[in-house]
Amino acid sequence: MTEKLSHTPGAAPSRGPRRLIFETGAPESRCVMPPALDVPDVDLGAALGGAVRVEPPVIPHVTEVEIARHYAHLASMNFGVDSGSYPLGSCTMKYNPRVNEDLARLEGFAGLHPYQPEATVQGALELMVGLADALAEVSGLPAVTLQPAAGAHGELTALMCFRAYHRDRGDVRKRVIIPDTAHGTNPATVAMCGYEVTTVPSDERGGVDLDALNSVLGTDVAAVMLTNPNTLGLFDENILEITAAAHGAGALAYCDGANLNAIMGISRPGDMGFDALHVNLHKTFSTPHGGGGPGAGPVCVVSRLAPYLPGPIPHRRTDGSYGLALPERSIGRVRSFYGNFGVLVKAYAYVRALGGEGLREVSEQAVLSANYLKERLRDTYELAYDRTCMHEFVLSGSRQKREHGVRTLDIAKRLLDHGFHPPTVYFPLIVEEALMIEPTETESLEELDRFADAMIAIAEEAKRDPELVKGAPYTTPVRRLDEAGAARNPDLRYRTEG
Ligand SMILES: *Cc1c(COP(=O)(O)O)cnc(C)c1O
């Protein structure tokens, strides 16, 4: 390890990009051997009336071993939770048991067709009812839709239910209140739903400023939307006052449940006074994410909102069989069929394998890991809020910036050379030079120590040789990228010569 870290600026990267697949191989190379033709030969050109291309397509001609190496190399350029710890705050990049992938792939699940008659999919319906029951139990909110495909989609679904609920009561409301620590999807959801965003500041303990909240609440507020524990990793000490204040103004209280990994079996959003919550199955319940999906963002609500949920919703009939029904005042479908069923299978398997006690241990361990790391790093980096944290915590790199001109971005890039995925940086927005760290329950004590050692070593490097940190990373396939350029002017096409 030390050897690798002695890389100096300009040293050759160890795993550089290599030739594209189009530049590999030779015209005569093949990686398939089709069986001999056993049907009459047809002249395609003539059969299609000449409507065929005259130039052969530019496709790679490679052997099987070349293609195997090509993909193995691409995989080795990637960083995933299988390669090392991934303490990306708010995202809960924990390790997901492989067995749940196997279960989701069982022919009896993966081979189902959504148009199959109900009588032939009783097991699938039972599984969905079982998962909904478990989520209702964990959240303390009795009615559940499994349809939404992601967290942000769950937020939108819940706000659409809120709007329908207010409209049914002849109540016109136009604003949604969000704290300044909110995840970016919250204000985006509010805007998509046609509401205006009102932001409330946080107090010095990192919670919602109650006085500020009361001063912006009014009869035109449709909802108060917040995350608890919030994105600072802090449990709001005034949560009951906050939800009561919302209800006092006739508004509903929404909980962004992406941080459920911190509280399972310990406290329930329903008991905190929330009317609705989305759950990121792809954070807490065993679906890997970061690769673009699929995920699932089920929504749990109080009984008075149940009639508005999207459907159809699987339920158990009195005769013990399972069926599907559309709630009475449903906002309609938000996703084709029943949502991302494979993700639901994984979540159900995870819940059944761990049980209530196991889920509680997940959260306890996640919180313990975060507090352990926070204590190990508090003397090296500034701690944004000096409180017991939940499953994540926020450090600030402002000392390193002030004293050595090394920014949080530099620290994040240098962590790559130490073999770690960086934490979330520059979020939440209210913390200067923020580093938001979520170790998760699946990292061992040894791994937590390795991460803490790396963070401390980088702080030392910042002191001794700031240029080293500012030039990082040195050991990755590519060095610093023009991230804005890559997003604004993406060059995604491979141009063949001529
Ligand atoms: C991840 C996250 C979301 C959004 O979830 P997606 O599934 O990515 O849409 C919302 N809020 C918080 C706090 C999150 O961490």
Image (cartoon, helix red, strand yellow):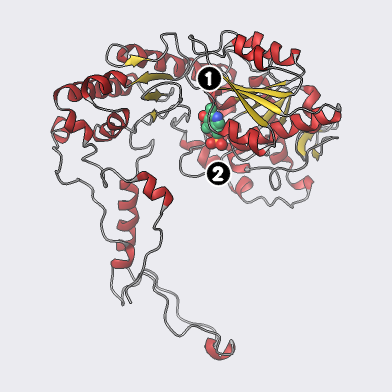
For residue 363, above or below residue 407? above
Image quarter hosting the N terminus: top left
From the image, tell me which residue sits under label 1.
230
Picture quadrant of residue 32: bottom left
How many residues crowd mark 2 within 10 Å: few (<14), some (14–19), many (20+)? some
Would residue 48 be found to the left or right of residue 396 on screen?
right
For residue 119, above or below residue 267? below
Callout 2: helix, strand or loop? loop
Amino acid found under the numbered disc labelled 2: Pro
Is residue 115 or residue 339 the one in the foreground? 339
Whether pointer 2 and pointer 1 mark residues with C-beta atoms closer than 8 Å, the reply is no
Q: Position of residue 380 (x, y in %)?
A: 27, 15
From the image, tell me which residue sits under label 2.
294
Amino acid found under the numbered disc labelled 1: Asn
Q: Is residue 284 visible?
A: no
Q: Earlier in the sequence, mark 2 or mark 1?
A: 1
Q: Identify the residue at image location x=15%, y=43%.
A: 10
Q: Identify the residue at image location x=13%, y=37%.
A: 8
Q: For the residues marked 2 and 1, what is the alpha-carbon distance in whole angstroms?
A: 25 Å
Q: Is residue 384 visible?
A: yes
Q: Identify the residue at image location x=17%, y=32%.
A: 467
How many residues crowd mark 1 within 10 Å: few (<14), some (14–19), many (20+)? many
- The quadrant where ligand 1 appears is top right
